[in-house]
Amino acid sequence: MKPEFFRSLRNLATGLGLGLAAMLGSAASAEPQYGIAMYGEPALPPDFVALPYADVDAPKGGSVITAEVGTFDSLNPYIRKGSVPWQLSSLTGETLMGRTLDEPFTLYPLLAESLEVGPNREWVSFTLNPNARFSDGSPVTVDDVIWSYETLGTQGNPRYATFWSKVATIEATGERTVRITFNTPDRELVMLAGIRPILKKSQWEGVDFAESDGLAIVPITSGPYIISDFEAGRSVTLTRNPDYWGAEIPFRRGTMNLEEVRYEFFGDETAAFEAFKTGETNLTRETNVARWDSQYDFPLAQSGDVVKSVIPHQRPSGMTGLVMNTRQPAFQDWRVRQAMIEAFNFEFINDSMTGGQQPRITSYFSNSPLGMTSGPAEGRVAEMLAPFTADLLPGALEGYALPVSDGTERNRDGTARALDLFTQAGWNLDDAGVMKNAAGEPFSFEILLETGGSEMQTIVEMYMQSLSRIGIVPTLTMVDSAQYKERTDNFDFGMTYYRRALSLSPGNEQYLYFGSEGVATVGGRNLMGVASPAVDAMINNLLTSADQTDFLAAAQALDRLMTTGRYVIPIYQWNVARIAHSKNLHFPEQIPLFGDWPGWQPDVWWYAEN
């Protein structure tokens, strides 16, 4: 399925030209707007009734229960401390504007009823919905908004800090209006301002927000669900708030239909799957195609009580695989990283794990128009990369592709290429067949994995067999989720599992993923340690592009830099989601552009026994 990229652009005035329209369109007016798009106009009209992929007639009630691998020790997703169920922020928390899954980056009213922006998006003003309430019934105020932005930006999770660093002022301009002015040109900032969480200020008076106990103090939020029960490390139950203030606003109609959403936590994938097979849980996402095809023949599936749904999407592949930590000397030479990629026998591993059914991830934005093209860089992409020519790694300008093996276990050609690259980097096999440098030091590193991920552990064990053929025997360390988070927060690993989901609207979050400032940020998301002026420049180009042409070129150039940086050994991509679920759980026929993505399940699902 070919991605329908930037479908929201279809409403642009044809006579203006794309670049001018992006600058002079909806963002140019200082009149109140019901919504805003990154480029052009929102696809939905001002009087839209509901999101296109929501069913306004869906019944209320029932429950969805999923099995999660791992554990948790906090219910506060807004601070740095603790391991938190990732779903909490989107189901219990709420933002000024809501992001639709049917457009790359368009926002519609949620806590705010409207917004205004400066002519060059240098400021944004939001007017709160007078009916907006926290779960305790108290109104959401401008004071809560200002406190939330400042507190999250200075004391909260690091993901909020980048946005806050670009805020010049935030001030109340009326009883229900707040205005944010920015200190740097960045077209995405008005969008990001709309999707920051809003917390209740008075709950945190006299409390150290950053150091608060994430189980003892659960944030009061304004979302449709509240945490009604939990057992630390074992389960979390969310219940639909019967007094939820926003049930009838257009963005929420037909959503949040399930009465209860429960997450059960298990030590490993096997236990989680067994819980689903016996009916202890009633929905699971399957990432292993071979298991999907061969192991869903248990009694509940045979009787039809469990059904299988395949959900397409049009998102970029993102990057999944094994990341190499370039902070460690072993991985600072790009030739070593390429050698590690050559030694990874993807075709054999893919055949063993999925029956060869999963295509390989070829770049960070593959499976989308944002992905780098094959062959040499051309046009605007080449122009953007040109100032950094002297520092670019091989392949960035002339073209790059991952190696392809013959599919046999020995992978002779890949092994030979890996050995040659190690030699170029100053490493050679000694008489005992051990890879060593000129000082006689063996090439060694640690692979860190979280317990419970049996699929990745199997992949790593097969990879280690391949590495042994070139004289490398890494250490495999398995730790629990708390230790894993602590160690990855401090970049204490040589290689580890890596998963970075990417969207059709990359922006400021790319600084968190790949920006130079994140190299030394404890708890940051730049796991590979990339520190590249060229990468920083391409991210800046993403944020300042006035039209789609430059935006696409910046994304493709960034994709080239990251892929040829050889930081991650990619595995397979998932261009569809495979969801097995109770026959009583249903979803609308219309699937959004982003497919199975936060905001779709459980948001637009419902329960019905007939």
Image: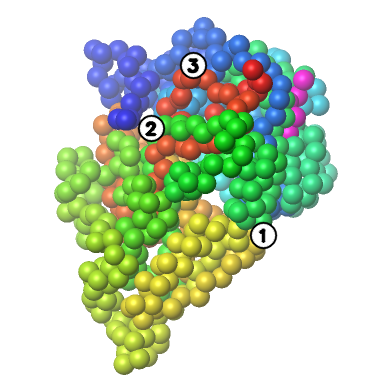
Q: Quadrant of residue 575?
A: top left
Q: Give 206 or 529, whichever is nearer the viewer.
A: 529
Q: Which residues are magenta?
A: 238-242
Q: Label 2's element?
A: loop
Q: Which residue is mark 2?
A: 314
* Residue in view at x 46 percent, y 75 percent: 474
The residues tagged by marks 1 and 2 sit, at their Cα atoms, a distance apart of 34 Å
* Residue type marked 2: Gln
Side of 336 relative to 203 (left or right) = left
Front-most of residues 549 and 330? 330
Where is 399 relative to 67, above or below? below
Q: Amino acid at mark 1?
A: Ala
Q: At which x and y percent is residue 138?
A: 79, 23
Residue under label 1, please give it: 482
Element on which disc 3 rests: loop
Query: In the displayed structure, would residue 439 be above or below residue 88?
Result: below
Sequence-earlier tag: 3 or 1: 3
Provide residue 377's location: percent of width, then percent of height: 19, 47
Q: Residue at x 51, y 9 (%)?
A: 48
Q: Earlier in the sequence, mark 3 or mark 2?
A: 3
Q: Element type at marker 1? A: helix
Q: Does the magenta run of residues contain 240?
A: yes
- What residue would you read off at disc 3? 52
Real-space Cα separation, disc 3 to disc 1, in angstroms: 40 Å
